[in-house]
Image: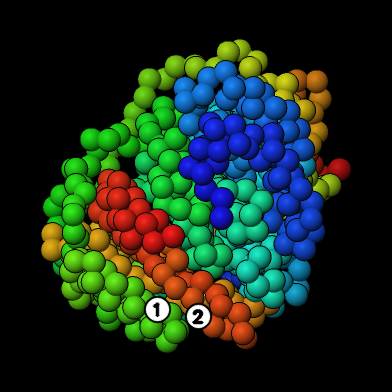
Amino acid sequence: MNRDDITHLAALARIRLTDAELEQYQADLPAIVDYVSAVEGITEDIVSEPNPGVRPNIFKDDEVTNQPNQFSEDIIQQMPHADGRFLSVKKILQTKD
Amino acid sequence: MNTLSTLRAQFLAGEYTPEQAVQATLDTIKTSDGDINAFLEVYEDAIEEAKLATTQYAKEGEQAPKLLGMPIAVKNNILVKGRKATGASKILEHYTAVYDATIVKRLKEAGAIIVGATNMDEFAMGGSTENSAFGVTKNPLDTKRVPGGSSGGSAAAVAMNAVPAAIGTDTGGSVRQPAAFCGLVGFKPTYGAVSRYGLMAMGSSLDQAGPLTNSVADAELLHEVMAGVDEMDGTTIDTDTYPEVPTKETYTFGVPRAFLKEGTDPDVLKAFEKHIAELKSQGHSVVDIELPLFEKGLAAYYIVMPAEVSSNLARYDGIRYGHSAEGDNLLDVYEKSRAEGFGPEVKRRILLGTHVLSSGYYDAYYTKAQLVRKQMRAELAEQFKQVDVILTPTTPTPAFKIGEQKNPLAMYSQDIFTVPVNLTGVPALTFPMGTVKRDDTMLPVGVQYIAPHGGDARLFDLGKKIYDERQ
């Protein structure tokens, strides 16, 4: 795992790392990845049925259970950039000008 | 030592009132918490609720709700409506909960008074509370040492006698390890026994909320109030989801000897052997068992958990709530908000989770870890045909010193005995099994009892017989 790999992971994770952080994670992530590789040798050989603790998907009716606007004010109040009842965000696409 | 049952008796007899109890809580916090830092926020207005509870006892007596007037502290990754819910993270420093978590709602309905929010490792990631964005919590039994984590503030709040009980969350040992480090009872329910609605998700397939208390009976009481089906959490289980796990007069305990050898402190092992001898003298039988896959548990956990962390924490992006950095465009806002808002351990786990889920590595790590998990469940089910309860120390060492564990991997190894429980979804109880001497201080060490799925009541039955009765 080299510096470019860590930079790539940070980009995927949407976290901007400082040089010091890059250095730190480059120093400690490989040992952790190496440790968790202990799962590699596992194969499909032991499986008992039924397997307790595994439960099927649970579905519920697709219906609105809140009152209209029950939480809206509280939620809007905590938006970093609220504009009336809208949430304002930075533009996504860069234009050439 | 304060327990909920003694408080209840005093409240009913009129010898002591909820108002006095909550005032005592606020006073203890004032005198001790400047040093300990167990609380992120103290709800001074709780005294008003306590006055009402005092009147209600006078009116209702025995009919009063069972937790009426009990001061309880809650870990700050659990939502309490109208209060700050920070997860001990800068990214949520100014966030206020807009609803009550189901467990908080149930505690309030039972009359409990929520007196404050406790410190923790940021987003519950850590085993020492050193990862809080708002300063470390000290262990009240030895302030040079950590209280454990991630529910370290909850453990310290009880250990410093500010509250008789506190609520924590346990993803890989975060209730049990701090309980063990602070000499308390801690309980991790069967996965699904308690609703996760209103808990900040860390590892959704692992997280459960549980009590930290001074007695097993208190842990049982709080668990019973919090547990049960919740339509807001589809993974909650009903009483008939699993086959009945009966209580017995005497039990057969299984000890996974080979698993205990690696890295366990000799003094902890000595206390553990003494506990085994006590069990035998009380008529229980103790046999050796093998759980070879449990040795891979920690590796599987540090794949599954970061994978879920990287997905769950994607929601903190600086857009809808929480810390938002100024940026030139949307991506810039995401990257800067997360860079400024998250601490080093949270970033480490998000990066690790992103790595194990990335294409090319997914099968080698995530798929394999899920297979380990499935086979651990099978291995455990096989052992539970011969034994009633599995026994391990809760942690391999007693509480370590603040700043002592610098290597993340060494810190993770603290979780060796607790993570298999979360990976398989079974319940586990910890309580003090003895003490070990470090620098002239006697430090508590915990024993962990593990039962089959749905065996929560068996653990309480045993814990009350073995721990509560000798107090």
* Disc 2: CA contacts within 10 A as few (<14), some (14-19) or many (>=20): some
Q: Position of residue B412 (x, y in %)?
A: 51, 72
Q: Can residue A3 be seen in this snapshot?
A: no
Q: Secondary structure at mark 1?
A: helix
Q: CA distance from mark 1 to mark 2?
A: 8 Å
Q: Which residue is mark 1?
A: B271
Q: Is residue B244 left or right of residue B313?
A: left
Tally of numbered tags: 2
Identified at 41% across, 47% down, the residue is B217
In this view, B49 is above or below B129: above
Q: Secondary structure at mark 2?
A: strand
Identified at 60% across, 59% down, the residue is B159
Q: Quadrant of residue B424?
A: bottom left
Please give the label number shown on residue B422.
none
Q: Quadrant of residue B153?
A: bottom right
Q: Is residue B402 left or right of residue B418?
A: right
Q: Pointer 2 indicates a residue of which chain? A: B
Please give the label number shown on residue B436.
2
Q: Residue furthest top?
A: A68
Q: Can residue B81 be seen in this snapshot?
A: yes
Quarter of the image containing the N terminus of chain B? bottom right
Query: What amino acid does circle 1 point to?
Result: Ala
Q: Pointer 1 indicates a residue of which chain? A: B
Mark 1 or mark 2, which has the lower sequence index?
A: 1
Q: Nearer the viewer, residue A26 or B420?
A: B420
Find out whether the residues at labels 1 and 2 contact each other: C-beta distance under 8 Å.
yes
Q: Are marks 1 and 2 on the same chain?
A: yes
